[in-house]
Image (tube, coloured by chain):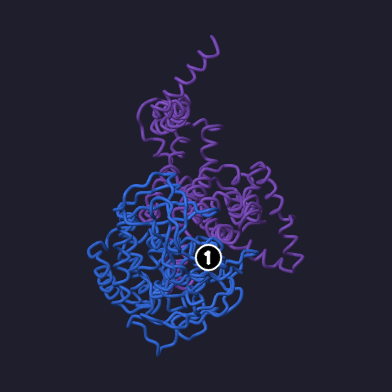
Chain colours: A purple, B blue
Amino acid sequence: MSLSASRTLRRRVSDLFYLHPRFLLLLLLLPPLLWLGIIYLGSLFNLLLYSFYSLNDFTGQVEYRFSLSAFEQLFSSAANIDIVVRTTLMALAVTLACAVIAFPIAYYITFYTRGSARTFWYLMVLLPLWSSYLIKVYAWRLILAGEGVVSWFFNALGLGWLLQGVLSLPVVGGTSLSNSYLGMFLVFTYIWLPYMILPIIAALERVPKSLVQASADLGARPRQTFWKVVWPLTIPGVAAGSIFTFSLTLGDYIIPQVVGQPGFFIGQMVYVQQGTAGNLPLAAAFSVVPVVIIAIYLLIVRRMGAFNAL
Amino acid sequence: MSMVDRPYLAIDDRPSTIDTSMPNAVELINLSCHFGSVRAVDGVSLEIRPGEFFSMLGPSGSGKTTCLRLIGGFEQPTAGRILLFGQDASRLPPYARDVNTVFQDYALFPHMNVRDNVAYALMVRGVGRAERYRRAEEMLEQVKLGGLGDRRPGQLSGGQRQRVALARALINKPRLLLLDEPLGALDLKLREEMQIELKALQRSLGITFVYVTHDQSEALSMSDRVAVFNQGRIEQLDTPKRLYEHPRTEFVARFVGSANVLEGSIIGLKGKYALRPERIRVQPGHHGGPGCLAGELLDVHYLGSQTRYEVRVGEQRLTAITSSDETDLPIGSPVTLSWDPSALRELEVSR
């Protein structure tokens, strides 16, 4: 093919794309759509399907007939309900803590830093995501261990009694921080914090400064400006962040294994049931639980008007 | 020389709304605001009387908006003082000043409907819901937006948003209203309507307006007095008429009404002179005679009722505007310019 011919062809392709932008869009979106449609949604649907199958106790084979036995099994056992409640409470606590810690950080970065200082803070927020999740979790186990740096620090300050007092509390306590729900909560909060900070920054950045000034101009003190103007406009960001922290905590099965009291979380249950126990329908039923909880969560958040300002 | 400006202390044609017995609405004393090496406002002193419609006019970056923001409390002065109604407000936060602002981008709260936006100032002061909604509705009626209280700002047109911003700023009956290029985003026709309305509103409410604009015709048509800003300083502060008729500096002459700035040498005088385009007569051909200058016609712009001529006279390029009923002159043809000597205004030598 001559040079001019290839040029003509290229121009024709360009013209085609320019005149039919939807065609280009389709071409670009087809691979991800196929991936999302078949691999992602397909497996999710398959999962849902499996939760309505049952396991033949004698053969250990999955019976491909509609049955609610997996859900019966899930909800008839007090231990299983404990797992669901424990995981949900942990996810809620972690989400709340992340929001409370993340908001001032995001607020500071958005309104009080500029240029290279801002880049530095972004880097500080993102830096923990650069290292492996497993390394961080095991590092935390050491930090929180009975002989770890945290208890050393408390002892060095003469506050060892305080740590012991906290650890002797029922439910949250344990033999050491690394063997307590409190420790697990700390690790979860640390690990998911960036996922809360970033959406809040994104939301705060979209609040025009002139709105804050207009509020002050109309006589609102800083506290009123915050609650009447800044906060309502930032709720979508907090909601987005909370969806991350909430669902990530609901589905995690490593942290509960490495840090904290013995006692299963939903993610571990799924892992065990589909692996060692070989009960795929029950594992599927357990996996449906977080999906349902998050759906309910989203409904509540929406009711609260989180998406009104979108 | 008799045509040179005198210092302006005299205040002529002052409207009756201005009360001279009260303290000044705004008094800026040697006010400066520097951002690093940028001298946004550099030693500005002025007094604005209660009930006055005062404009700050200047190109972008001239310091007029910063000056307004200093009065509103959104910027902190690096030096100098701000007095509002006789009280020192230099260090007061915006919420402690009896001043309201109409922002350039309107700054309407997107998560509230129009009624809540307008009632905001009452809400933060703890006025009950029924009372503040009643007053918000009144205010909306006043700016001709009655019945639109349930809409979101996003559902309104630019002109309507502008009115909401105005209603929101006026609901607390401030004694001083700051307007930061409030009509900048509106199209020409709407802008002209709003100019008339704003002026009428200011008269009926008797509030002091401080109006920032880069549009000289806007400033001239609405204001009692105008301060022309350039590089953080006031070039001239005067009534619109004196500003237009007697520009003091080359900058003012050019910026307000785009006057020609004539080198005195071409008319046998010293210094520089301002000459309004509409004061120049254009005649075809070259004629001798006192007060006549021969030139070459460079360009002709037909503007409807008027025609603008660009004429080269020696090294200089002059603009003349005449009414359009004259015969067409071809580009490149010789022309003669003349004017009444009283039309010349001697300018101060720039600093």
> Residue tagged by mark 1?
B250
**Farthest-out residue, right:** A156
Residue A218 seen by the camera: no
Query: Eyeballing the image, is A228 above or below A3?
Result: below
Residue B348 point in image, percent of width and height? 55, 71
Relative side of A271 to B167, left or right: right
Which quadrant does the N terminus of chain A fall into?
top right
Give the residue at x 50% y 54%. Answer: B313
Q: Quadrant of residue A23?
A: top left
- Residue A228 or residue A253, whichever sits in front: A228
**Farthest-out residue, bottom:** B21
Residue B266 point in image, percent of width and height? 54, 60
For mark 1, does the 10 Å Cα neighbourhood hold few (<14), some (14 to 19), or many (20 or more) residues?
Answer: many
Q: Quadrant of residue A168?
A: bottom right
Residue B123 point in image, percent of width and height? 36, 73
Give the residue at x 68% y 50%. Answer: A140
Amino acid on which the number 1 mark rests in the picture: Glu
Q: How many marks?
A: 1
**Farthest-out residue, front:** B288
Give the residue at x 68% y 45%. Answer: A138
